[in-house]
Amino acid sequence: MILLLTTLTEYLDQLLRIDEFSSIDASLNGLQVEGAGRVNKISLAVDGCRASISKAARNRSDMLIVHHGLFWGDQQPVTGIMKKRLELLIRNGISLYAAHLPLDAHPSLGNNARLAEMLELNECGGFGEYGGREIGVMGDLTRKITPSGLARKIGKILSTRVELFDFGKPRIKKLAIVSGSGASLAGEAEEAGCDALLTGERSHSVYHSAYERGITLLCAGHYATETVGIKAVGQHLAREFKLDTLFLDIPTGV
């Protein structure tokens, strides 16, 4: 199926509730670069970068949807690597669409919601306040599990290496999840009664705080924890519109 770019962009804006995050997210969420007016094939990736744009061009994609886009914060000059990235997009007629916090927080397609579903969390609620919005989730595992057992389970699900900081109880029941750079929320997780926090990147500054609070940290990688939401968006668009979608796996090792 072929969709007008304007139709698909409006659909994504509403689906991911882009406007709700405009005041708190440094990312320019939504359509960042306009390409071809019609969309048939979509590539999806965690990061908007030369590697993902080049792969999307080789796949003859009309659109690239990413979690980490090109435009953040204040205005940036179009020079250096930014110039080269934009040249690749425009030369190949590829539209770039970004969803940062909207994709972390989405109740069904979001990174944290998808991780909770994969780990079969029960009685899920919101967690991880940022700018007055809860970005993450927390809930109970179906059964108590050792920290090392949970680390192995997460590693298997995400095909990644999990760094375990076993500072808490010998068995974990209540788990908080914030993908990406969520280690700083260890204190909030402990105050919410969680036994552990699953996030992406580890944090030197949080180490002693987590240790002294007695809460376990499971760091599964920024990249790995943020592949699940963008994959879910691709699957949703393929089902909803019969579009040709492809996830571009470009791991960073972080």
Image: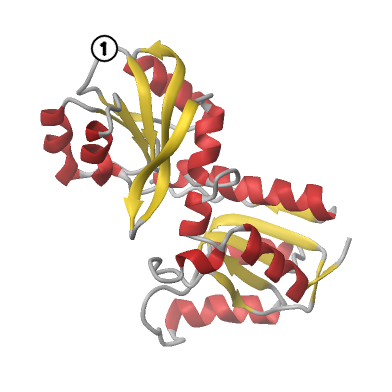
Residue toward you, 140 or 153: 140
- Circle 1 crowding by C-alpha within 10 Å: few under 14, some 14–19, many from 20: few
Give the residue drawn at x 32%, y 46%.
182
Give the residue drawn at x 51%, y 35%.
115
Horizontally, residue 78 falls left or right of residue 62, namely left
Residue toward you, 55 or 233: 233
Residue 100 screen position, x and y as percent = 48, 60
Horizontally, residue 78 falls left or right of residue 212, namely right
Look at the image and tell me whether residue 169 can be seen. yes
Look at the image and tell me whether residue 54 can be seen. no
Give the residue drawn at x 74%, y 67%.
8
Residue 133 screen position, x and y as percent = 39, 55
Residue 85 screen position, x and y as percent = 54, 75
Residue sitting at the far right:
1
Q: How many marks?
A: 1
Q: Is residue 230 above or below residue 194?
A: below
Here the colouring is secondary structure
For residue 202, what is the image quadrant?
Answer: top left
Name the quadrant of the N terminus.
bottom right
Three-letter amino acid code of the residue under disc 1: Pro
Q: Is residue 5 above or below residue 55?
A: below
Q: Is residue 188 above or below residue 37?
A: above
For residue 95, what is the image quadrant?
Answer: bottom right
Q: Secondary structure at mark 1?
A: loop
Residue behind mark 1: 170
Residue 120 screen position, x and y as percent = 53, 24
